[in-house]
Image (cartoon, grey):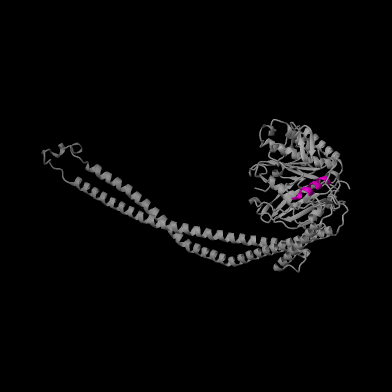
Amino acid sequence: MTSAPLTIRHIFFTGPSAPPATLAFQKGLNVISGASETGKSFIIESIDFMLGGKSALRDIPQRVPYERVFLGIETADGSTYTLDRSAAGGAFRCYPGLHLDVPIGITPQILSAQHSATRSTNVSRFLLDKTDLDQRRIRRNAQGDTNSLSFRNLTHLTIVPEVDIQKTGSPIETGEWITRTSEFSTFKLLLTGLDDSSMAPAERDQGERLSRTAKIEVIDELISTYHDRLREIGDDDSNEQELQEQLARIGGAILEEQELLLQNEESYRDALRRRDGFRRRLQQARERRSEIDEMVSRFALLEAHYESDLDRLEGMREAGVLVTALEALPCPLCGAAPDSQHLESDCDGNIEALVAATEAESSKIRLLREELRQTVEQLHGEAREFDDSTPALEQDLHASESLLIDMSPSLAERRDAYTELIDQRTRVQNALNLYSSISELELRRAEVTATSQQEPEASTPPVVDISASTLDAFSALVEQILNDWNLPDSGRVHFDMQSRDFIVGGTPRGSRGKGMRAITHAAFTVGLLEFTRIRNLQHPGFVILDTPLLAYREPEGREDDLRATDVKDRFYIWLSQRLERQVIVLENVDPPESIRAGTQITFFTNNPGVGRSGFFPA
């Protein structure tokens, strides 16, 4: 067999009320850089999810409006496929070609999320078949028992999230003790092209045979329990294929019902907005009408004051006129004749001036009174307008409230129908999960039964082994990569079988700071990709690295600090020259200008007003 690498072409999220979130990839180097909290780590989780990952997608707020995920892949012969999966998990739909939505007129192949050695209709077997790794077996325990290779056995060697790239443990292992044997066997398969199909398990003693019998009894009890649960939810008469078809139909009905529900809710919200608008306008009219009544009352008092002032001034004017009309007589005090009297200087008042002043003040007050009357008339006119418009507003408010009352039952029914479909989908998905568990248990029972019927010749369990020459060749390649990246103090690199990890420059890789652990983990991962390419061995064909240049951002001490070196530039330049396979790097630091040409680069600004803010549209 020859290598048949895969290439990831795109990851795409869709939702009925949200703009699509998409990211395209090419063969060779792809870089996604930018600030934290922009969705970079979520991208790697989503790709893993679409390659059969069982962990549900993180429920981050930006993902809530999206319900479907599409992953486009390309095989070594140029064929393309699109995997379609609900964001909630479950089975896959597989379409030929690259699509960013459900294609019209193409019947998908339904692929289970659970790997099965006996059935090929699952996403694991589909991906293994495209990489020429199907039907391989790997050792799973010290007794030499083997399992069918699952694509999930390979993902930790190709997809390295941030929390794993800086771990102290071996890059070969996930950290689970029970899977150490199968993980090393998977590493051996990629490094040599040889699986464990020819391995015969060691002979068990009587206690082991009794243990197998007990295992079979436990498995049978679990299978019976799962069948009881199927009967409880009413799906014991349906087979897995029927449930898959039923789930697809329910999914389509949910999309239609959701569209109708969104339309009804939007109409209901429009009616609510209209009712609130009528309420607001009616309240404003009533408040303004009260203000007018209050102002008219106050202006009436002001006009009364004006009338009082006018009466007082008129009295003063009349008194002045009468005084000036009196006959001139000698002064009763000094006896001066009228012609000799100096009234303007010897007396306090000038009657003629007083009369003129009262007339001027009266004219001013009459002008103010006229302006006041005009203002009052305007207020009365405004009050009449409010009195005329208020009944119409009250009628519109009543009509809008009646419309909301009429719409409520329909909206409630639509919501109930949508909820019922969601419940049906959950029930069918639970039934499928039970069928998947039953299938897995039946497979496990068959394996235990087959093991108990075998009569192996060997009494000593075989040992998973890789030839020293192969490990030396791989170690030399990793050493050359670190030298090409100009990593300080890298020195000699060799593989330690005890720790199943590398010794770099005389120091165990896991003993370095987290920044150095990240960059050396990256060297291991791309080294394995390059090793299989050079020797034409099977490999998924792509690697995804999350923050391999951690030492540039969060170094642990001086020996872990690479900021004064050119490792970053050499790292990107080296990767940009490997065009035969795909490498996806997610980093906070930007790549150098020298590799921009020919590299797929996406930058997240974390600023809705500048460029692309993140994976999900702002």
Q: State the predominant SS element of the stretch in magenta.
A: helix
Is 403 above or below relative to 97?
below
Along the viewing direction, whichever of 414 and 514 lies nearer the viewer: 514
Quadrant for residue 427, please give it: bottom right
Nearer-the-camera pick, 512 or 250:
512
Q: Would you place residue 526 above or below residue 218 in this image? A: above
Residue at 34%, 51% in the rendered image: 369
Q: Nearer the viewer, residue 245 or 227?
A: 227
Q: Position of residue 119 (x, y in %)?
A: 82, 59
- How many discs mark residues in the rendered view? 0
Is 391 left or right of 141, judged from the image as shown?
Answer: left
The residue segment tinted magenta is: 178-189
Res 526 seen here: yes
Residue ranking furthest to the front: 206
Q: Residue at x 33, y 52 (%)?
A: 302
Viewer can see residue 590:
no
Q: Position of residue 586 (x, y in %)?
A: 71, 42
Q: Is residue 24 magenta?
A: no
In the displayed structure, 216 sits above or below 63; it is below
**Direction from residue 182 to residue 384 in the image, left or right:** left
Q: Residue 414, image x and y in percent? A: 64, 65
Tell me: residue 221, above or below residue 298: below
Residue drawn at x 24%, y 50% as measured from the top left? 315
Residue 437: image location, x then y, percent = 75, 60
Q: Is residue 180 magenta?
A: yes
In the picture, measured across the screen, residue 64 lies left or right of residue 174, that is left
